[in-house]
């Protein structure tokens, strides 16, 4: 798969007034619910990588599942850890959302905003792992700038613990 296929599909949806095979809000919400289920193991896996490599296993991973909020439909996967909680910063989050006024769903983080979210199968979801890693590492970078590097366990504990 070409790395730009999802973006081209996203733009085509805007052009055609569709999202996948759906043209109405109810159909798009049904596809979004399925996309969240497909993305769940991929998002959890990316957060487990972050926990293992950057948080040195100190993180707590959680998922909300699909839920409704005043802005639309949302699903969220988070990882929090002691240093982050002590500073009052939000946990790292991967967020799939389909806002009330949106034509189709998007992915975002806490500080990193809107990426296309055109997932219609488990295979599509698997191709999102690099995007999820980019969102989560961008968020971690931004949280470090809101406080400092000591919120990241692998960095705070010294170079001897940094591994590839």
Image (cartoon, helix red, strand yellow):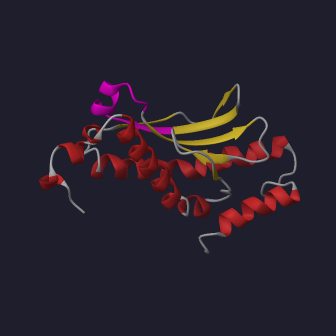
Q: Residue furthest bottom?
A: 2
In the rendered image, residue 150, in percent from the top left (x then y), is placed at: 24, 39
Look at 24% across and 42% down and name the residue there: 153
Image x and y of residue 130, in percent:
49, 61
**Magenta range:** 77-90
Left or right: 2 as drawn, with respect to 61:
right
Q: Residue at x 37, y 25 (%)?
A: 88
Image mark count: 0
Residue 82 is inside the magenta segment = yes
Which of 102/35 is in front?
A: 102
Is residue 71 highlighted in magenta?
no
Front residue (pair 125, 72): 72
- Residue 46 drawn at (x, y percent): 43, 52
Please determine whether, in this image, residue 124 is positioned above or below residue 71: below
Left or right: 124, with 52 as reference point: right
Which quarter of the rendered picture does the C terminus lie within? bottom left
Q: Which residue shows up at 20% across the image and 55% down it?
A: 162
Which quadrant holds the N terminus?
Answer: bottom right
Q: Nearer the viewer, residue 61 or 139?
A: 139
Q: Position of residue 96 (x, y in %)?
A: 61, 43
Q: Is residue 55 above or below residue 64?
A: below
Q: From the viewer's perspective, is residue 87 above or below residue 131?
A: above
Q: Residue at x 12, y 55 (%)?
A: 160
């Amino acid at each position: 798969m070409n790395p730009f296929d999802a973006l081209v599909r996203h733009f085509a949806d805007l052009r055609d007034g569709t999202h996948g095979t759906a043209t109405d809000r109810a159909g798009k919400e049904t596809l979004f619910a399925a996309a969240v289920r497909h993305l769940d193991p991929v998002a959890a896996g990316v957060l487990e990588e972050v926990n293992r490599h950057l948080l040195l296993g100190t993180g707590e991973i959680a998922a909300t599942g699909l839920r409704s909020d005043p802005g639309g439909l949302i699903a969220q996967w988070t990882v929090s850890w002691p240093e982050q909680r002590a500073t009052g910063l939000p946990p790292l989050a991967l967020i799939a959302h389909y806002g009330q006024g949106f034509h189709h769903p998007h992915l975002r983080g806490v500080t990193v905003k809107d990426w296309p979210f055109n997932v219609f199968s488990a295979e599509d979801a698997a191709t999102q792992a690099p995007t999820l890693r980019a969102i989560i590492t961008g968020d971690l970078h931004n949280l470090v700038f809101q406080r400092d590097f000591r919120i990241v366990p692998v960095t705070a504990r010294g170079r001897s613990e940094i591994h590839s």
